[in-house]
């Protein structure tokens, strides 16, 4: 049995068989029941539950802060670790279409693209000597920020918020020559060895690869950036940034995890970013197009030293080997 409500619709009976209440009386009853339930919830929130909730929130915020301080490491793989020795490790990657817009040099412009790492191409002793050369030159200058460079070819040296010519400064102050012919001889030998390794890997005649500007020592520290030249951590493509680059190489002069933390070299790929962990004497090389988009992590502690040795297929971008300036 059912009854009709005020609008003529039949309402179902309640569980006791009485007609369902409608209108203001029903709303008043529902509000009363809701208030009773709310009171029960308030009474159920005990001091113990409050403490547990606060503890959970603090732990969550702590985890978020830790992850934020380390940066986003999702999808990150290691191409070569610092503590492993690899004679040669190569990864082929598809060449970018960008090369179509650049001048083509037969037998040199990349047709096969990729990246590689070699340990043992440069000895620990040679790397140690090159590190001493870098420190000797950088001691006469140094950026106010976290990145300093020394170019043995042009004499460019970071100094404060700008650059100076090291050779002109030495000449003006009548200092003794900073570098010896033995220093330059070692530098040339190592450069030629790296060039030969790149030429062999990519099937190029070595004499078609020309050392190009800029080729330089770098020192990276934790000091905050003062100018754009200190901001080494931005994503970039060498061919677009420098123009003359066709093949890029780096020779590391310090050890990740020992001499510094942070500062890993990171290739940015669609599937997962891939890191090279610096190791003294390790050579990393790659084709300079957008297929090898990359950046360097900010140095978190210590000091990172390396040499960038770059090559061009275009003879007009060639630079001469450095010699003692008389």
Image (tube, rainbow, N blue to C red):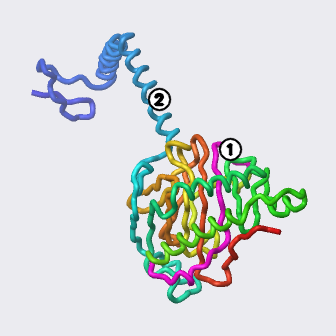
Give the vertical position of 94 relative to 171 (above or below): below
Which mark identifies residue 34?
A: none
Residue that protrudes farthest toward the front in the picture = 182
Instruction: Provide the secondary structure element on which disc 1 rests.
Output: loop
Q: Give residue 268's position: percent from left, percent from top.
A: 47, 60
How crowded is the residue under tag 2: few (<14 C-alpha within 10 Å), some, or many (20+)? few
Name of the residue lying farthest toward the bottom: 106
Q: Nearer the viewer, mark 2 or mark 1?
A: 1
Q: Position of residue 206 (x, y in %)?
A: 53, 81
Residue 233 image point, x, y percent = 59, 54
What residue is drawn where x is 57% and y is 54%? Answer: 253
Secondary structure state at the residue bearing disc 2:
helix
Give residue 224's mark: 1
Give the numbered dot on residue 62.
2
Residue in front for this viewpoint, 181 or 293: 181
Q: Is residue 230 magenta?
A: no
Residue at position x 35%, y 17% in the image = 38
Q: Which residue is at a point 72% across and 52% down the rendered structure image?
A: 136
Quote the CA–CA distance across marks 2 and 1.
Answer: 25 Å
Q: Which residues are magenta?
A: 202-226
Q: Quadrant of the C terminus?
A: bottom right
| Mark 2 or mark 1: whose residue is earlier in sequence | 2
Q: Nearer the viewer, residue 130 or 228?
A: 130
Q: Quadrant of residue 223?
A: top right
Q: Is residue 191 left or right of residue 199?
A: right
Q: Nearer the viewer, residue 227 or 108?
A: 108
Q: Nearer the viewer, residue 197 or 58?
A: 197
Viewport quadrant of the N terminus: top left
Residue 116 percent coordinates (x, y): 44, 66
Q: Label 1 neighbourhood size at 10 Å, few (<14), some (14-19), many (20+)?
A: few
């Amino acid at each position: 049995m059912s009854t009709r409500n005020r609008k003529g619709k039949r309402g179902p009976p309640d569980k006791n068989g009485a007609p369902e209440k409608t209108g203001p009386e029903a709303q008043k009853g529902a509000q009363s029941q809701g208030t009773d339930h709310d009171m029960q919830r308030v009474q159920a929130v005990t001091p113990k539950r409050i403490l547990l909730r606060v503890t959970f929130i603090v732990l969550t915020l702590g985890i978020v802060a830790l992850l934020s301080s380390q940066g986003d490491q999702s999808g990150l793989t290691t191409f070569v670790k610092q503590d492993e020795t690899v004679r040669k490790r190569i990864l082929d990657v598809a060449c970018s279409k960008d090369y179509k817009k650049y001048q083509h040099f037969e037998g040199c412009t990349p047709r096969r693209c990729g990246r590689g790492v070699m340990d043992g191409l440069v000895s620990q002793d040679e790397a140690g000597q090159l590190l001493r050369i870098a420190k000797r030159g950088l001691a006469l200058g140094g950026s106010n920020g976290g990145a300093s460079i020394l170019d043995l070819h042009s004499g460019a040296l970071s100094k404060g918020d700008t650059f100076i010519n090291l050779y002109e400064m030495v000449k003006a102050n009548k200092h003794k020559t900073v570098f010896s012919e033995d220093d330059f001889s070692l530098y040339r030998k190592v450069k030629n060895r790296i060039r030969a390794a790149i030429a062999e890997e990519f099937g190029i005649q070595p004499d078609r690869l020309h050392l190009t500007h800029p080729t330089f020592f770098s020192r990276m520290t934790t000091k905050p950036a003062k100018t754009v030249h200190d901001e080494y951590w931005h994503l970039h493509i060498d061919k677009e940034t420098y123009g003359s680059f066709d093949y890029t190489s780096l020779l590391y002069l310090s050890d990740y995890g020992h001499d510094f933390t942070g500062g890993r070299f990171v290739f940015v790929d669609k599937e997962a970013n891939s890191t090279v962990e610096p190791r003294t004497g390790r050579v990393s090389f790659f084709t300079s197009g957008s297929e090898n988009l990359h950046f360097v992590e900010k140095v978190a502690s210590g000091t990172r030293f390396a040499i960038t040795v770059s090559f061009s297929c275009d003879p007009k971008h060639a630079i001469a080997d450095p010699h003692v300036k008389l």
